[in-house]
Amino acid sequence: METITRIHTMRERIAGWRRKNQSVALVPTMGNLHKGHVKLVARAQELADKVIVSAFVNPLQFGPNEDFDKYPRTFEHDTQALTRVNADAMFHPGAFEIYPMGHERSTLVDLPEISGILCGAYRAGHFTGVATVVTKLLNIVRPEVAVFGEKDYQQLVIVRRLVMDLCLPVEIEGVPTVRDHDGLALSSRNRFLSRGERNTAPKLYLALKAAQKRIQDGDTDYAAIQQNGMKTLEAAGFEPQYFAVRQANDLQPPRDSSRELIILVAAMLGKTRLIDNVQVAVVEKR
């Protein structure tokens, strides 16, 4: 596996593949790879001849009081992990390569209808940073397909929307969340949990599954379901930020006609922010 740090080198390598009529998939990450990322790479390998994994900790998506400096940088581990799964290249640029004028002065991609809700209400500017760097990566690599995990579901909806709005010729593939044996969604931030917090963390998923069952059983009192989810998490020791039932396609509140829903949650457990979601289909009443 080759590690590439410069945009012009990345484009030269891709041009060589194109001359051989080989298709390209991109898996954007911030590094610190785990089994969930490996699943994304495996799916990308099913969809394209060549797979590029970007590993770039994007300063533009971190707020002033967030953990940019503490975010794990695990280059050697990531290189070994991608070599084991036969990825073709890791794109590992420095910040200057992506933001030559500095990220504070970068042209921005903003989706105000989606970026300011749910996680965006608690992380001002986060999804503008995500949308901007993803647009840059898609323009650098120009893949046929880009693969994202469904754990960061709001991010996935935003990426699909920006691709549509900006007429980018790429397919966006979502891959189901990879979970530990007890249901906790795999995340780079799980390493920050204490042993006691790690034992509590799976209750986030249990709360989602309980809400999912209520909807599957025909309960459409979404306000009550959301309120119950918040109370359940508070009782378990979380500081929930939101527990929301939304339309799966656009993250807007459900309508009477809505059939494909998603239940999303974000909560603090100690100093660690956890997010998760489950999808659910509404059964039409006869």
Image: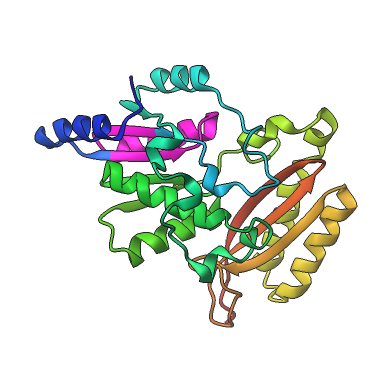
Query: In the image, is residue 87 above or below residue 253?
Result: above
Coloration mode: rainbow
Region of the chain picked out in magenta, as a range? 25-53
Residue drawn at (85%, 32%), measured in percent from left and top? 196
| Residue 63, x across and y down, in percent | 64, 49
* Camera-side residue of 248 and 266: 266
Residue drawn at (29%, 48%), measured in percent from left and top? 139
* Camera-side residue of 56 and 27: 56
Quarter of the image with the C terminus is bottom right
- Asked whether, in this view, residue 163 is left or right of residue 246, the answer is left
Query: In the image, is residue 58 above or below residue 110?
Result: above
| The stretch drawn in magenta includes residue 27 | yes
Residue drawn at (25%, 47%), measured in percent from left and top? 144
**Residue at the far left in the pictured view:** 19
* Camera-side residue of 204 and 26: 26
Quarter of the image with the N terminus is top left
| Residue 101, x across and y down, in percent | 41, 45
- Asked whether, in this view, residue 239 is left or right of residue 216, the answer is right
| Residue 238, x across and y down, in percent | 83, 49
Does the image show residue 54?
yes
Residue drawn at (53%, 81%), measured in percent from left and top? 257
| Residue 239, x across and y down, in percent | 82, 52
Quarter occupied by residue 262:
bottom right
| The stretch drawn in magenta includes residue 43 | yes
Task: Tell me how many marks there are.
Answer: 0
Does the image show residue 173?
no
